Image (spheres, rainbow, N blue to C red):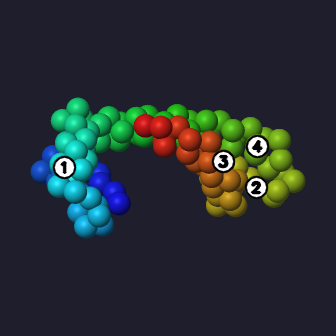
Amino acid sequence: MNAYASGLGATKRVVVWDTSIQRMTEDEILFVFGHEMGHYVLGHVRNGILFFCGVLLFFLFLAYHILHWMLARWGETWSIRGADDLASLPALILLLTVFGFQFTPIFKCV
């Protein structure tokens, strides 16, 4: 059972899953719909997107600096000439994966 509010502009919508409709009473469905409408009215979708973009920008900034530090330290050993070398892509993906893992608990709270 699930429901959510999503979208921006003309695509805004509240969705109540069919399993929720099948297993809940009418009052429970109205309560869940009202809860999701609260997210819609308070702009939580927009705020969540803006928060995610800010965190992504911060993590990309960190990844840029940490990647350059990693390449200065181990780049010669790894045979990577610089950050513009395609061979540095696995190191960047590793950093973004670690940051994504660290962000997961924060994103679940938002």
Q: Nearer the viewer, residue 39 or 74?
A: 39
Give the residue type at disc 1: Asp
Does 89 sit above or below residue 50? below
Residue assigned mark 2: 80
Residue assigned mark 4: 70
Query: Do the residues bearing badges 3 and 1 touch, measured as CB atoms within 8 Å?
Result: no
N-term-proximal mark, 4 vs 2: 4
- Cα gap from disc 1 to disc 2, whole angstroms: 62 Å
- Cα gap from disc 3 to disc 1, whole angstroms: 43 Å
- Cα gap from disc 2 to disc 3, whole angstroms: 21 Å
Measured from the top left, where is residue 7 in percent x and y?
A: 23, 50
Measured from the top left, where is residue 94 in percent x and y?
A: 68, 53
Near mark 1 (Cα within 10 A), the count class, few <14, some 14-19 or many ≥20, is few
Residue assigned mark 1: 27
| Residue farthest to the right, as pictured | 77
In the image: residue 3, left or right of residue 68: left
N-term-proximal mark, 1 vs 2: 1
In the image: residue 23, left or right of residue 91: left
Please indicate, yes or no, whether residue 36 appears anywhere in the rendered image: yes
N-term-proximal mark, 3 vs 1: 1
Near mark 3 (Cα within 10 A), the count class, few <14, some 14-19 or many ≥20, is few
Please indicate, yes or no, whether residue 8 appears anywhere in the rendered image: no
N-term-proximal mark, 4 vs 3: 4
Image quadrant containing the C terminus: top left
Label 1 sits on a secondary structure element that is: helix
